[in-house]
Image (cartoon, rainbow, N blue to C red):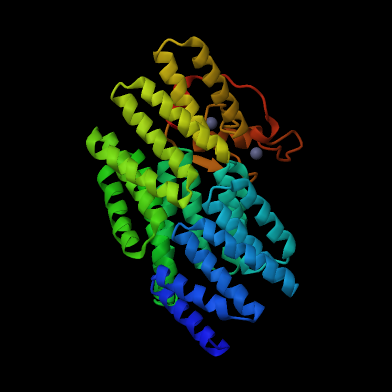
Amino acid sequence: MGQKLARRVRDRGTRLYQQQRAEEAVDRWNRALTKLRDPRDRFLVSGDLCRALCELGKSREALEHAGQQCGLATELGDPGFMAEAYLNMAICNLYSCEFSKAVSYCRSALQAKPEGGDFTGYLHLCLGEAFMGLSEFQKAWNSYTRAQAQAHSTSDRVLEMRVQASMAAVYSALNDHDTAIACCTAAQQLADAVTRERPPPEIGGAVTRFRRRLATVIARPCRKLGRYNEAMDYCEDAMKLALLHGDRPVIAECLFQFADIHRKRSDFERAQPRYESSHGIMIETGDILGQSRVLGGVAKLSASLGQSAKAIDLFDRALALAQKIGNKMEMLRCHARLQLLYDAAHDASMTHRHGSVVRQLCDEMDLFCGVCDDILGSTPEKVEALTCGHFIHARCVMHLARSTLGRSGKPRPCPACRRHASLNPLHTSDVMALT
Ligand SMILES: [Zn+2]
Ligand SMILES: [Zn+2]
């Protein structure tokens, strides 16, 4: 194959990808890659492969291409290419739940190309998602607001819609379901605007892919608010499209949501096989966080059926996975449930052991409202982010206005920033809503 032909094969791959035929696109790009000689061409195709493979749930293969990009970028000696290669390494690590590595690669990318531009916004978004994977809410929020500022300054609506969806996931985790839904709605409107401005196929593929993911994000707060039919509708639509385009991460997430809804409706016979299918796909795609959440769902199902020993075993397994990837929120959920199960079994020592870890995790995640000291998310209610990235209850904002002004009239740091690592009284019932 000559270079001209190799480039034509590459372009054919790009068109297939725009038409959301990712598997076929990957096939063409792989063929082009074996023939292309110019390192710049090879770099670009490797980057395309990396993104498409992540979307297909093949993050391990994607990682190889990101690694090749790093090699090519070094060869080219171009900081822009180096930064892009690091960002792709970060994205691959994000997909395989290697959150700490993702953080490191984002930081390397920021160092490689510190001058800004559109690219930096996407880097901060990725960094925020990596921090979210570690349940570092404050750092995640700060990264998202940086990405958002970048999106505003460059009028990049695609970036903005993605940031809104990520912010929705933060509110969702803190049990502020109404704000989570509002962020998702904003993201949907941005997606609509982008589609109007730049119709398919140029942008269509990226936006429809985003919409599928967004549907699974919005389904969560809907489900938590008991709006099961609505949550089901969102996931059914996303599932149909995901099946059509081989979007395995979205398929797995939809199955998990279906299972949870059936469990909530006490339809355990329907829930069980959906948990199993979801779990199977997540093992293949390397989604360890998803696996932990699914095992937690099956454990809750077992607990509902009165099978406490099985539930404890499953929560222990879910906990081990959450610990492996360092997701503190998922760890907290498991410990809180285990505390409850051991308490019901009158095992005082295990109850105490899990209870003390719950307390420690709440502290580490700064889950206490800096004003009233209650746990954020212990009841579903509106929360607000402060400029430092800490969250407090919306109802506590008024009190904060008074308490943060010192005698000189200058603002003091937020209470959570001041009160780091102090011990707070905590009751099991306070964290159950978070589980
Ligand atoms: Zn409060
Ligand atoms: Zn603060």
User: With respect to residue 181, does 75 lie above or below?
Assistant: below
**Residue 135 screen position, x and y as percent:** 56, 40
Position of 151 compared to 412: left or right? left
User: With respect to residue 19, does 65 lie above or below?
Assistant: above
**Residue 175 screen position, x and y as percent:** 44, 38
Image quarter for ligand 2 = top right
Residue pictured at 44% horizontal, 44% vertical: 290
**Residue 128 screen position, x and y as percent:** 59, 51
Q: Quadrant of residue 257?
A: top left
Q: Nearer the viewer, residue 258 or 279?
A: 279
Q: Quadrant of residue 364?
A: top right
Res 165 visible: yes
**Residue 346 screen position, x and y as percent:** 42, 10
Residue pictured at 34% horizontal, 25% vertical: 303
Residue pictured at 32% horizontal, 30% vertical: 301
Q: Quadrant of the C terminus?
A: top left
Residue pictured at 53% horizontal, 56% vertical: 60
Res 114 visible: no
Position of 166 compared to 128: left or right? left
Position of 224 compared to 99: left or right? left
Q: Nearer the viewer, residue 320 or 131?
A: 320
Q: How many dots with numbers?
A: 0
Q: Nearer the viewer, residue 178 or 222?
A: 222
User: With respect to residue 411, does 47 lie above or below?
Assistant: below
